[in-house]
Image: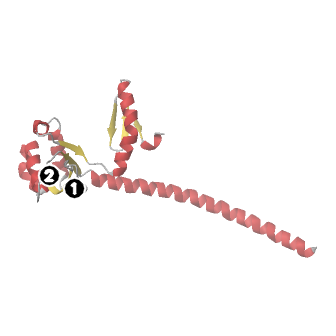
Amino acid sequence: MANLTATVARVVVDVDRHGKNIKDVQSEIVKLKEENRLLKTAVEECKRYSWRWSLKLHGLKENVNEDVRKEVIIVLGKVAPGLQVYLEDGVDIAHRLGPKRTDGSNRPVIILFALRRILDAVWKCAKGCKFLRDNKLRLTQALSPEDRLAREKLWPLVDKARKEGKRATLIGPFALIDGKKMNHWDVK
């Protein structure tokens, strides 16, 4: 009987100790989840920042043995004639996205700029550019895959808000609807 009482007492002490350990582990898990969320957000912001240095050019015809960078510099020189002398240094890399298409359609070109002020000036000149329209070319912001998914999720909200007469726009991975910022995780 004394053995049984001692065993039960030890089991009770062990259960109490394990209960405390479980609570400690649970609180540590909560802290780690929050830290993980913050780190993911920071990594996404770093990716987003690197994508901000790029534009996409749609509609540029593909040629055999083409020098995409030179062709892009020629196009951008016509979009922003005042920047032509700076484009050779301002455009770092230009390449086609994805594998060659079997349907004969042109792959978009991603353009990485070495100088942010050149990118901003080209982007500003591209708005309403007659040369781009006449040649069926289009410059767009290059978005990370995560930002594209976020925008796809937010677009129905923006479209609905516009139809209701509200001011609504997409900015990166966010939507602004009547001055209120919406995140993709807010959408069900």
Q: Is residue 178 visible?
A: no
Residues tagged 1 and 2 counted as in contact (Cβ below 8 A): yes
The residue at 19%/43% (across/down) is: 139
The residue at 35%/47% (across/down) is: 147
Q: Secondary structure at mark 1?
A: loop
In which quadrant of the rendered image does the N terminus lie? Answer: bottom right
**Count of marks, rendered view:** 2
Answer with left or right where residue 60 lies relative to residue 42: left
Based on the displayed image, in which of its 4 quarters is residue 69 positioned?
Answer: bottom left
Based on the displayed image, in which of its 4 quarters is residue 39 positioned?
Answer: bottom left
The circle drawn on residue 82 is none
Between the C-alphas of marks 1 and 2, the distance is: 9 Å
Residue for badge 1: 100
The residue at 38%/29% (across/down) is: 161
The residue at 62%/59% (across/down) is: 26
Residue 154 image position (x, y, % from top left): 39, 39
Q: Secondary structure at mark 2?
A: loop
The amino acid type found where label 2 is placed reads Glu
Q: Residue furthest bottom?
A: 3
Residue 59 image position (x, y, % from top left): 17, 45
Residue for badge 2: 62
Q: Is residue 21 visible?
A: yes
The amino acid type found where label 1 is placed reads Lys
